[in-house]
Each structure stands twice: as C-alpha cells, then as structure tokens.
Image (cartoon, coloured by chain):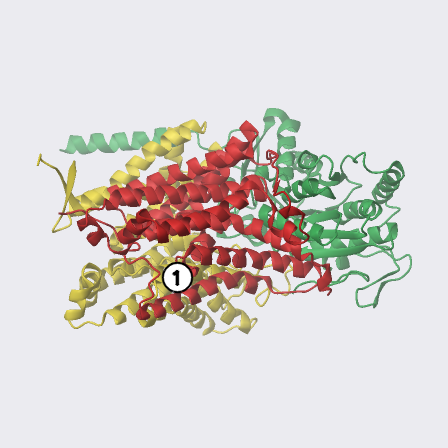
Chain colours: A red, B yellow, C green
C-alpha cells in the first residue's frame, strides 16, 4: 500500500463529477418536498432524462442541446405525476413508484436503438487563471459547464428558499396546505410548478450521466442513483448546502474505494455501499429528535394530499 | 370548474369497476404502444392475457406457474394492505423479503448436510423472523422518534441488497460452486427444500399459504375488532387514540406483520422456485406487491385476483417476448400504466364530482 | 334461456378454437437462446446474438431461432426455458453461468430437447456445456500491453473474483511480465459484469494512478470510451470495440460462438448431437479470436503477438508454462510443465509478482 500513488487532485475532481447527477436530481426533489409533495419517481425521471438527452445529443451532435432535451423529458414525465396526484388526488407513494416503473420501461424502449452508440464530443471549460493553480485548479476549475451549473443551482435554491418571498410561500404550502390555502395561496398551482421543476432537474441529472459522466446509453444505467438522490434530500435535512456536502460524501465513497483498491487495499465493498443508506437513516433519526427543540426540517405536509373541499 | 365532494360511503360498484376499467384502459393504450413497436397488438394482448390460461400448448404448465409467480406478490401485498389501510407506509417489503430469505437460508445451510425433520419448519420460522426484524427497525424508529417510516423502510431495501451481495459472495457462497457467487441450492438439500406439493406442477407450500392467508386476512379485517381499529387509525388517528387503542401499538403491529409476510415470501421463494441465495435473487416482488395491493383495493380477495392478474402479465409477457419479439421493457411500461390508470380512477371512488355553478 | 346459454357456450368454444390456432413456432428445427442482458451491450450478450444470427443465416429458412433478453438467473430462467420447450424448441442455448441449475431441472422435464449451457459444469444426457479458453487471448493481449506501456503500470478492471477472471489476470500478467520485466499490475474489482458508470469510474481511477494501458474483464464499452478520452490504450472485451475508441483500441479478444452454434445445430438436426460433453476451446478452434491490430502497435510487436497467437493455436505454446510460482512464492509449475485443465478451472490464486489479494 502506498498512499502517495493516489492522485488526490484527480480524486477530488472525479468525485465532483460522480456526485453531480446526485446534486442535480436531489436539488429538484428538495423543492418538490418543500412544497409538501413526496415524489418517489426520481429514478424514473432521471432515466428518462438520460435516454432523451442521449438521443437528442447524438442526433444533434451537441451534448448541451441534449441536456435541454433531458430537462424537458424529465419535466414531461413529472407532469404525469403532477396530474395524477394533484388533479386525480391519487396516493403519492404509489404514484411515485408507478412513475419509476413506467419511466424505466419507456426509457429502455426508447433507448433500444441507441445502445452501443458513441456520444457527442464534450469539452471542459477551464476557468482562466484559476485552472492554472496547481492541485486546486485540477480539483475545481477544469470541469464541464454542468458541474458549475450544479453549484450555481445550490446557491440559487438556497437564496430562493431563505431570502425570497416566493420561497417562503412554497415552504408555507409544504408546511400546512390548509393554512396556506386560507391565506389565499394557490396550493395546487404552486405544487404543480414545484413538481415540474423537480422533474426537469432529475432529467438534467440523468442527462449528465449519459452525456458527460459515462458517456453512453445503457439500459438501467441510473442503477439506483434516483434513490440515493432521494436519500440525500433527507440526509441533508432539506438544506441545499448540506445536500451538496452530502452528495460529495456519497459520491466520494465510491471513488475513494476504487482508489484504495488500486493501491492494493482490500476493503469490503458491500459494507461500504451500505454506508450512505445507513447514514441517511441516522440523519433522519437525528432530525426527528431535534424537532422537539423546534428545529424543523421536514415539511409538515410531506406526502399528504390537498383536497379543496370548501 | 369542478368540485370534489367526498363520498360518505365508498361505492362498492365503483370500487370493483376501477380495477376492471384500468385493465381495459391499459390493454387499449398498451395495444397502441405495441402497434408502434411493430407488434400486432391483438396478438400481443391475447398472448399476455389469454394464452397462458387457455392455449393447449402452454396452459397446463402456465396456470400453476401463474399461482407460483403470484404467491409472493399476494403474500407481501396482504401484509402491506393492512398497513396502508392504517396509513402506515411500509414500502421496504423488498428488503424484508431479502432478509427473510437470508435468515432462513443461513439457518438451513449452517446445518448442511444434516438431514432432519425440524430443519424445514425452523427455517420457515427463521425466514418470518428475518423479515419481521427488518421491518421492526422502521417500526421502532417511527414509534420512538416519529421517524418517517416511508424513508427508513426504503433505505433499508438498499442495505438489504448489499447484505445479499455479501451473503452470495461471502458467508453463504457455495464451497463446491467453482468460486462463482451464489449459495448451495436449497432445492437439492432435501431437509430444507420447499418441494412440490402436487407432482409436475411446481406448486409449493408458499402457494398454499398465500391462499390460506387470503382467508385469514379476510377474517382479520372484516370479522375481527382489529380490522376495525386499523381502519379507524387510518381514517382518523385522533379518534383512534380516544377509543382507547394505543396507535403506536397498532403502527408497530402493522409494520411487523407486513415484514413477517414478506419474510415468509422470501424464504418460500429461496427454498423453492429460486433455489439459492444469489446477487440477483430479488426481482422486485416487494415493489410490485405495492401495485398488487392497490389493484386489489386493499381487500384480501381483491389482492388475490390482482396478484393473479399481475402474475399473468409476467408469464404471458415472457411468451410475447420470444414468440412476438416484444421487448421486455414493454411489459414494464404496461405495468406502470396499469397502476397509473388505477390510481387515477380512485378519484371517482372516493369523491363525487360536481360541476361548479356560477358564483 | 337455454338457447342463449347454448349459443354463448358454442361461441365461447369457437372463440377458444380460433384464438388457439397457430401458436407453436413453425420452422423445421427451432432453437431458443436466453441472454442475461440486452444483446445491445456490445459485449457478452452481443456476441451470443451474433452466434444466433449466424445460425439463422447458415440454415436459411430451415431453422428458426428465438431469443429472450434480460432473463434473471432465478426461477424466471426455468420458466422461460420451459415455455420455449413447450413452444416447440428443439435445442436451447443458455448463455450464462447462473442458468446451470435451471437448465438441469428443465432438461429433466424435456428429455427430447437438447440443452447447451455456457460456462457451467453440470451436464446430463441432454445437457452439454461449452466455454472458451479466453485466457489464451489474454496472453496475446498481455504481451501487447507489456510492450506498449510507457509508465510500466497496467490497469485491470475485473468483475467477480471467480476462477475464470483470476485465470485471465494471471495469463495477462505472465505475458506482460515476459514482454517487459518492469511491468506492474493494478487490479480493481467492481463486483458486477455490467455497469458502465462503475466501469468508467474504475478506469478513470486506474489512469489517475498512472496506468496507461487498461485491460478489462467486464462487459461494457465504457472503459474504451474513457481510455480514448484520456489518451491511453485499452482492449476490446468479447467483441470489437474500436468504434468507441479508434485510437485507444489496440485489439480485442472476441468471443467466437458462431462456428460452435452452427456446428451444434447441425448435429442436432442430423441426430448426431451428444449430451454430457464439455467443450473448452480456444484460439485453435476459433472460439477465441484476436481482433484487428491497431496501427499504433509497432510492426515488431505485431509480429510477436501474432506468433504467440499462432503458437497457441497450433498447440506449441501454452499460456501457463512453468516455471511458475504462486503469489506466496510456493512453486506451482516446474520448468516446461503446463497447467492442467482442473487447476485452470478452479484457479483461485495469483501467480508470483502480482500485488494485492483476491477478495474473499
């Protein structure tokens, strides 16, 4: 074992790339959950984004146009979910699962002719001057556009939720929809927008997988990333910055594990792969306990249907 | 615009029509999808829903197979339905199913090659225990700290999947298996084998138990006070508290009951049709059972029929794959659609819709 | 009322008759294939499907093939094969190790149907097995890798720690070491046969740690894509993957199932097919094919590689020829001695020189 063989700058850089799909999808789900809706269909929306992004990317030859298509595809699929739970008042848990099953199936069908095809070329954007800094430059300033976009999204969403009126309204709808309704806010419309935003973000996360990270289309390529994103939202206690850190930890575990193996350290992969989920459960317990001290993270109405009966 | 008025009594006719309409709708939209995939929609629909039951070539084999494929779905869905009625959301049955299989198989394989009558029953009990222990984690966290059981039970599915990988590569790996992942084949270990009850059909104890459980749950829910208490907890937790029941006790019961049944399904499957613990042992029964529970309207008899219909889409779906070249994913889309239609139709079951007059 | 019932039952029977017509596969000889993944993977399943198509072509309309993709290695495999047999299949190729027990079970129920199981070790009167000596190909690839590396570090992305994979690592290492005594192997186990994201991450990690040639024993083409991007070399696994990395792709170890499948179907039709046989063929029989060599490889190295290939094919050269010690230094093969099939099939140790442990 020789730790000096590990190139830590590259390790951090690839950890960031590995975590970016999680950051994107989880940020979307964060907004959805803050509005009081639990959408378990993240995996389905991600994979639809991955396949649609790849197809359009290949056809147009531009990965970035592909990413736009990924967002649109994710949003379209989430519309279905929004319609069923908001208009048809269906159960959110079951509808989310249906969305995942449906999305995985549709994506496999759409992607069938595109398996084993090369993806369009992508370029990384080296930020001038900053990328020249030794080590730090490699770690942070030689990425593709989407990585920077994910970081900007974290900041924007944090600002939106804590500093903007619209964010406050969104939170109040999630906290108690009856009160929000009586205050004159349009619960259904707000939730609708939140769900579509969540779908678009999940789609972008999926598109990043197929167009940037791997880059290739293969059936079932999200391989549970949607569920990790879901876990991540909870792990973060519904806070954007913690979400980012959590994503880097979750994504980092895999990359670190591979690096340790390559220098000859044998670690138990199964145990390591469980860690994110166990950490999430632990975080949930901590959040639920600290709630007694008035520190509320989880939206009060998470998962409950809103029925306008008055 | 429209206005929703909750129904005081859920209409039994609509309750029954919902699933039937959904199946019809899914066939219609699915048929269009098949057409665009270049497969004759009539032939495909017929092959999924008709041939496994009626064709001379396949039916003698596939009818029992439908019951075998349906058994774990029915067992798990029955357990889940009780919780769903009480508004307790165990969506981690997949994990409990895996843990049931690991617990039971570990017990039996630790005694290999000893042959004795007590191994099989103890193994089944261990399976039930494994599933219920795994479901007790979200149950305890829910009751003690009010932690959301949806998220905890879901997370535990992924932990269980890793344990499954650990078992098939490590502590349960077949020492005579040329180093490949996977345990010894339990169906070749006669004291632990969940063997055929009726020669040549493959019908095993799990199938019989799934039928018995349908009756048991029917009695439990409709002829026993517990069924009433559970419904009360689901409809109004406060009233449930006033009536002197301990809601925590009920929540705990609902979760462990569903975990036990998932564990039972797991051990039946691993000792029977699957035969061995392997990385790919779980094929999503725990999640599909959620569809089954809803398709069956959370009613034991309904769940029985829903399980059979769902099994039919699998068995018939396989036929269409190699006979008509329909891609495997099309069947998945088909199942997703079925659930969508069904969930949407619930609106009409629970609410009356009135056109709003002018103000 | 009676008439209505009579009419209804008559029309029901009629409907059953109409609906039941025309269900079996119709050609003279029917062959079924089951795959563990999608044939579009450009790896393991893709090559089996190439073999299936070769059968289609070789016999024209006389043989009809059917296949099913994504069949899990569980009770589902047993059901799929039974349904194929019921639909009239005369021969079934089960193309993954985990189908072993299901194949034996189904074979018992259908003694007239002939079963061919890839990479397994259980046979019966109507079950034969077949597998390829992929390690022979790895000798050729290992030699090229040893010659082409500048950093003297070769990365190896491995799937599961099973004899098949360990054998491949040892064979490649011995050849690379012979070509270049300073060479060092870095092995990453990813515990899956097919997960493009994981494979890509593993390859990136190896490259970041200095590897400039990547070998793989996993099925997707993701590693080739990564190698092309990073400007290092890699080898195609199971099929030619040069489309994914025209500069990176040095050559490929191609699984050549087609001649075997055509031969077995021919035997099946002629009635000369035998059960209980265990085929283990390599380069000589065309079951392992070395793909086109990239022009980046110097002519001298090309010549050496071809000499190794031809030597193995002719039987004058063996991938495991002594003296070879095991990793712990204990002797395994004496000078000039070659490994026997039994040791090869159960290989669970590294040869001397490879660092790290095989995970347990």
Q: How many marks?
A: 1
The relative height of residue A256 versus residue A125 in the rendered view (above or below) is below
Residue A275 visible, this orientation = yes
The residue nearer to you, when weighing B342 against C212, is C212
* Image coordinates for residue C19, horizontal then vertical, percent: 36, 31
The residue nearer to you, when weighing C311 against A14, is A14
User: In which quadrant is the C terminus of chain B drawn?
Assistant: top left
Q: Give the chain letter at badge 1.
A: B
User: In which quadrant is the N terminus of chain B drawn?
Assistant: top left
* Image coordinates for residue B84, horizontal then vertical, percent: 28, 58
Which element carries disc 1, helix, strand or loop? helix
Give me the residue at 24% from left, 46% from top.
A187
Give me the residue at 33% from left, 39% from top.
A80
Residue A37 visible, this orientation = no
Furthest-right residue in this view: C335
In the image: residue A251, left or right of residue A29: right
* Image coordinates for residue C65, horizontal then vertical, percent: 57, 33
Give me the residue at 23% from left, 49% from top.
A306
* Image coordinates for residue C221, horizontal then vertical, percent: 64, 41
Q: What residue does disc 1 label? A: B153
In the image: residue A83, left or right of residue A207: left
Rate crowding at label 1 as few (under 14), some (14 to 19) or many (20 or more) other CA atoms within 10 Å.
many
Furthest-front residue in this view: A129
The relative height of residue B226 versus residue B318 in the rendered view (above or below) is below
């Amino acid at each position: 074992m020789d730790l000096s063989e590990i190139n830590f700058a590259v390790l951090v850089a690839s950890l960031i790339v590995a975590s970016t799909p999680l950051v994107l999808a989880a940020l979307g789900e964060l907004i959805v959950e803050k509005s009081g809706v639990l959408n378990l269909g993240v995996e389905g929306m991600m994979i639809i984004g991955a396949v649609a992004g790849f197809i359009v990317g290949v056809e147009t030859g531009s990965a970035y146009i592909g990413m736009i298509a990924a967002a649109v595809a994710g949003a379209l699929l989430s519309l279905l979910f929004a319609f069923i739970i908001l208009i048809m008042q269906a159960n959110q848990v079951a509808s989310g699962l249906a969305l995942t099953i449906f999305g995985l199936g549709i994506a496999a069908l759409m992607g069938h002719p595109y398996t084993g095809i090369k993806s369009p070329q992508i370029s990384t954007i080296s930020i001038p001057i900053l990328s020249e800094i030794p080590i730090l430059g490699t770690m942070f300033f030689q990425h593709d556009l989407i990585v920077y976009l994910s970081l900007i999204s974290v900041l924007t969403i944090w600002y939106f939720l804590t500093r903007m009126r619209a964010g406050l309204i969104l939170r109040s709808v999630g906290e108690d929809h009856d009160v929000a309704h009586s205050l004159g806010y349009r619960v259904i419309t707000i939730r609708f927008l939140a769900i579509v935003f969540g779908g678009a973000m999940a789609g972008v996360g999926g598109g990043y997988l197929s167009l940037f990270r791997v880059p290739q289309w293969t059936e079932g390529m999200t391989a549970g990333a949607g569920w990790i994103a879901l876990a991540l939202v909870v792990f973060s206690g519904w806070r954007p910055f913690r979400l980012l850190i959590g994503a880097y930890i979750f994504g980092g575990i895999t990359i670190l594990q591979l690096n340790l193996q390559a220098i000859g350290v044998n670690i138990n992969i199964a145990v390591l792969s469980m860690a994110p989920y166990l950490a999430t459960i632990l975080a949930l317990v901590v959040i639920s306990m600290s709630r007694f001290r008035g520190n509320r993270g989880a939206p009060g109405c998470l998962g409950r249907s809103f029925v306008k009966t008055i | 615009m429209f206005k929703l008025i909750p129904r005081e009594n859920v209409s039994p006719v609509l309750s029954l029509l919902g699933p039937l309409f959904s199946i019809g709708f899914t066939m219609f939209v699915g048929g269009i999808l098949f057409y665009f995939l270049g497969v004759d929609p009539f032939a495909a629909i017929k092959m999924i829903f008709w041939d496994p039951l009626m064709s001379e070539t396949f039916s003698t084999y596939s009818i029992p197979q439908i019951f075998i494929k349906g058994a774990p779905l029915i067992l798990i869905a029955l357990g889940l339905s009780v919780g769903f009625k009480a508004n307790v959301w165990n969506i981690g049955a997949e994990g409990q199913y895996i843990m049931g299989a690991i617990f039971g198989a570990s017990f039996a394989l630790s005694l290999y090659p000893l042959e004795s009558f007590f191994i099989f029953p103890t193994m089944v009990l261990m399976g039930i225990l494994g599933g219920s222990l795994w479901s007790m984690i979200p149950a305890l966290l829910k009751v003690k700290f009010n932690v959301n059981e949806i998220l905890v039970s879901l997370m535990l599915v992924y932990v269980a999947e890793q344990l499954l990988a650990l078992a098939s590569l490590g502590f349960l790996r077949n020492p005579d298996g040329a180093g490949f992942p996977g345990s010894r084949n339990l169906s070749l270990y006669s004291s632990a084998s969940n063997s055929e009850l009726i020669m040549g059909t493959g019908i095993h104890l799990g199938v019989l138990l799934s039928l018995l459980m349908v009756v048991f749950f029917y009695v439990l829910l409709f002829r026993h006070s517990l069924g009433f208490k559970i419904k009360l907890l689901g409809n109004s937790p406060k009233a449930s508290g006033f009536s002197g029941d301990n809601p925590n006790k009920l929540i705990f019961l609902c979760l462990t009951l569903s975990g036990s049944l998932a564990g039972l399904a797991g051990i039946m499957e691993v000792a029977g049709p699957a035969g061995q613990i392997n990385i790919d042992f779980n094929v999503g029964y725990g999640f599909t059972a959620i569809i089954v529970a809803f398709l069956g309207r959370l009613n034991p008899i309904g769940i029985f029929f829903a399980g059979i219909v769902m099994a039919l889409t699998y068995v018939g779906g396989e036929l269409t794959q190699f006979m008509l070249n329909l891609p495997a994913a099309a069947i998945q889309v088909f199942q997703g659609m079925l659930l969508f239609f069904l969930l949407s139709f619930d609106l009409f079951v629970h609410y009356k819709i009135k056109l709003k007059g002018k103000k | 009322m009676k008439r209505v019932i009579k009419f209804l039952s008559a029309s029901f029977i009629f409907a059953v008759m109409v609906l039941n017509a025309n269900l079996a596969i119709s050609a003279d000889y029917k062959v079924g294939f089951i795959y563990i993944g999608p044939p579009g993977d450009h790896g393991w399943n893709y090559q089996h499907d190439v073999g299936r198509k070769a059968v289609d072509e070789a016999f024209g309309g006389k043989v009809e093939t059917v296949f099913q993709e994504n069949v899990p290695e569980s009770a589902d495999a047993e059901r799929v094969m039974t349904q194929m047999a019921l639909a009239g299949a005369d021969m079934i190729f089960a193309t993954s190790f985990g189908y072993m027990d299901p194949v034996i079970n189904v074979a018992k129920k259908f003694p007239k149907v002939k079963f061919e199981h890839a990479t397994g070790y259980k046979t019966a009167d109507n079950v034969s097995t077949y597998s390829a000596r992929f390690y022979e190909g790895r000798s050729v690839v290992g030699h090229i890798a040893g010659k082409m590396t500048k950093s003297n570090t070769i990365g190896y992305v491995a799937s599961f720690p099973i004899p098949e994979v360990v054998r491949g690592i040892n064979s490649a290492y011995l050849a690379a070491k012979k070509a270049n005594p300073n060479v060092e192997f870095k092995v990453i186990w990813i515990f899956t046969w097919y997960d493009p994201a994981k494979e890509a991450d593993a390859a990136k990690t190896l490259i970041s740690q200095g590897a400039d040639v990547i070998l793989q024993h996993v099925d997707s083409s993701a590693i080739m894509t990564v190698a092309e991007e990073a400007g290092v070399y890699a080898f195609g696994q199971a099929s030619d993957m040069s489309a994914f990395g025209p500069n990176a792709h040095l050559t490929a170890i191609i699984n050549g199932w087609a001649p075997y499948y055509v031969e077995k179907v021919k035997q099946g039709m002629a009635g000369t097919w035998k059960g209980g046989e265990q085929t283990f063929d390599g380069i000589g029989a065309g079951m392992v094919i070395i793909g086109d060599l990239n022009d980046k490889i110097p002519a001298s190295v090309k010549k050496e590689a071809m000499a190794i290939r031809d030597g193995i094919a002719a039987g004058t050269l063996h991938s495991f020829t002594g003296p070879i010690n095991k990793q712990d230094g204990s002797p395994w093969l004496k000078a000039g001695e070659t490994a026997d099939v039994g040791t090869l099939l159960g290989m669970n140790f590294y040869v001397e020189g490879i660092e790290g442990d095989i995970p347990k």
